[in-house]
Image (tube, grey):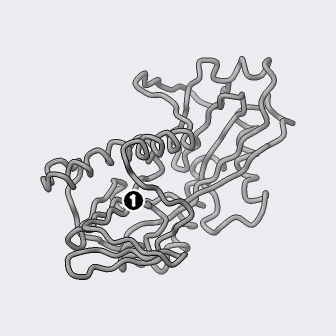
Amino acid sequence: GTDRYLGGWVDRRAGAVQPLGYARGLARAALNAGAVIHTDTPVTGFKRDGGKWTATTAGGPSVTADRVVMCTNAYGADLLPGLKPSIIDANTFQVATTPLPERLRAGIFPEGHVTSDTRNLLLYFRLDHQGRLLMGGRGPFREPKGPQDWAHLERVMVKMFPQVAGTPFEYRWCGRVAITRDYLPHLHEPQPGLLVDIGCQGRGVGLQTSMGRAMAQYLVSGDAKALPVPLSPVKPFPLYGLRRLYVNAVVTWYRMTDGGV
């Protein structure tokens, strides 16, 4: 559906999943297995006392357990001293058009491909099950202030797929991803009974499904060989206090070398 690329390759092992539907499915499976889930209950802190952990929540109740597993990626890293400076919590932005008419839909990823490219500030795009064209990429490091913060993606979409020019944009959203120094997920165990999983690099849906199985095996067996990456100490980024400056500088440079897109 676009002539903006010289070529590409297809990985036939790949697939697509609707992340919210997938999360709800996992929640149903956990409930059926006897787990208890508390939504809208953010943890505000936790501490170890007498060999057990107690997590306090914003609403007041607390939970006491033998072990704590922290899997909030770019969110909640400030709960553990030193953890937040070990990641860059960059924003990733996405837009979605209204459902495309059939004449347009038939010419854009007619086989349902899910695509990303190899530019430094990569773009990723696909059609959803109702025919909306979705595109994601980098956005401002700060929180968005209005629709103008997604305008660069909307311009790129029309440049990539000029046939959709004039199609309204129905949704705009964003969220933070955790980027580590070596671009790999990190597992930390700073204290006994506290396991931290962080650093999805924007690829968390499939990656963390597998990581979850490995962490469960480790928690049950205590065998660190079950983990796909070794437990490591928490290491901060150099000059972390200046991260917004150097991240913005890198993004500006990459945008220039990517041809202004």
Q: Is residue 25 above or below residue 15?
A: below
For the image shown, how many numbered marks are present on the structure? 1
Does the image show residue 99?
Answer: yes
Position of residue 74 measured from the top left corner of the image (x, y, whole percent): 47, 63
Image spot of residue 86 (x, y percent): 37, 70
Name the side, left or right, on which 7 lies relative to 157. Answer: left
Reading the image, the residue beneath label 1 is 71
Above/below status of 206 relative to 248? above
- From this view, report whether residue 202 is shown above or below residue 238: above
Image quarter of residue 196: bottom left
Instruction: List x then y, in percent, for residue 128.
Output: 65, 31
Foreground pick, 226 / 148: 226
Q: Quadrant of residue 53?
A: bottom left
The answer to whether residue 245 is left or right of residue 211 is right
Q: For the residue carrying disc 1, how many other residues have a C-alpha within 10 Å: few (<14), some (14-19), or many (20+)?
A: some
- The image shows residue 193, relative to residue 148, as above or below, that is below
Q: Residue furthest right?
A: 166
Residue drawn where x is 43% and y is 21% of the image: 12
Q: Secondary structure at mark 1?
A: loop
Q: Quadrant of residue 176?
A: bottom right
Q: Residue at x 14, y 56 (%)?
A: 222
Front position in the image: 232 or 69: 69
* Image quarter hosting the N terminus: top right
Residue at 39 percent across and 74 percent down: it is 55
Q: Amino acid at mark 1?
A: Cys
Measuring from the top left, give residue 256's x and y in whole percent. 61, 54
Q: Answer whether residue 237 is visible to the viewer in this image.
A: no
